[in-house]
Image (spheres, rainbow, N blue to C red):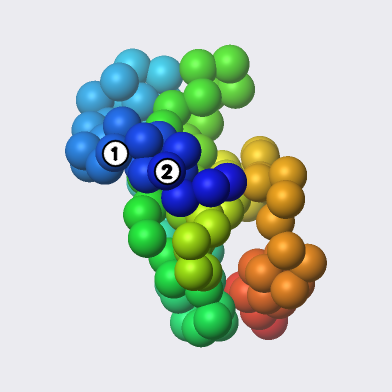
Amino acid sequence: MNKKNADKVKRKFSIEHQYQEALGRLTPEELDSALNTLNTIQAALEEEISDYAIDLIHDLLDDETPQIVRTFWFSKGMTDYYFCIDGTGMIRAMEQAMPYHLLDQIMSALDSIDE
């Protein structure tokens, strides 16, 4: 995604998400479990990926599942890439033009969690 469009989307979600809405759909235990999983994933991505910057991370509630979905915005140069994963560890979406090198690093980071 080009930098101009990505910056517009990131500005929209830059306000930290409040979880009151999620508590209407998830039990406190389900929310804690999802956030713990997402925090573990985030730590692995931050540890393993060094040649892309993580510019923004934001959480949203998927009303259909219901599940917390965390979006990671990676950038390198003037290009941004997004990657979405939910609190169960399921990949929900990613930038169509994501470089294979970045995708490989993301998959390696996720694989390292199970070890």
Q: Quadrant of residue 102?
A: bottom right
- Residue 36 shown left or right of residue 87 in the figure: left
Q: Secondary structure at mark 1?
A: helix
Amino acid on which the number 2 mark rests in the picture: Lys
Q: Quadrant of residue 43?
A: bottom left
Residue 67, given in percent of the width and then of the height, sits at 52, 31
Would you name the residue on which mark 2 appears? 4
Q: Is residue 3 visible?
A: yes
Q: Quadrant of the C terminus?
A: bottom right
Would you name the residue on which mark 1 appears? 11
Image point (58%, 16%), residue name: 64
Of 96 and 112, which appears nearest the observer? Answer: 96
Image point (44%, 71%), residue name: 53
Amino acid on which the number 1 mark rests in the picture: Arg
Residue 81, given in percent of the width and then of the height, sits at 57, 53
Q: Secondary structure at mark 2?
A: helix
Residue 48, given in percent of the width and then of the height, sits at 55, 82
Tell me which label, 1 or 2, sits earlier in the chain. Answer: 2
Of 26 and 9, which appears nearest the observer? Answer: 9
Residue 62, given in percent of the width and then of the height, sits at 51, 24
Q: Nearer the viewer, mark 1 or mark 2?
A: 2
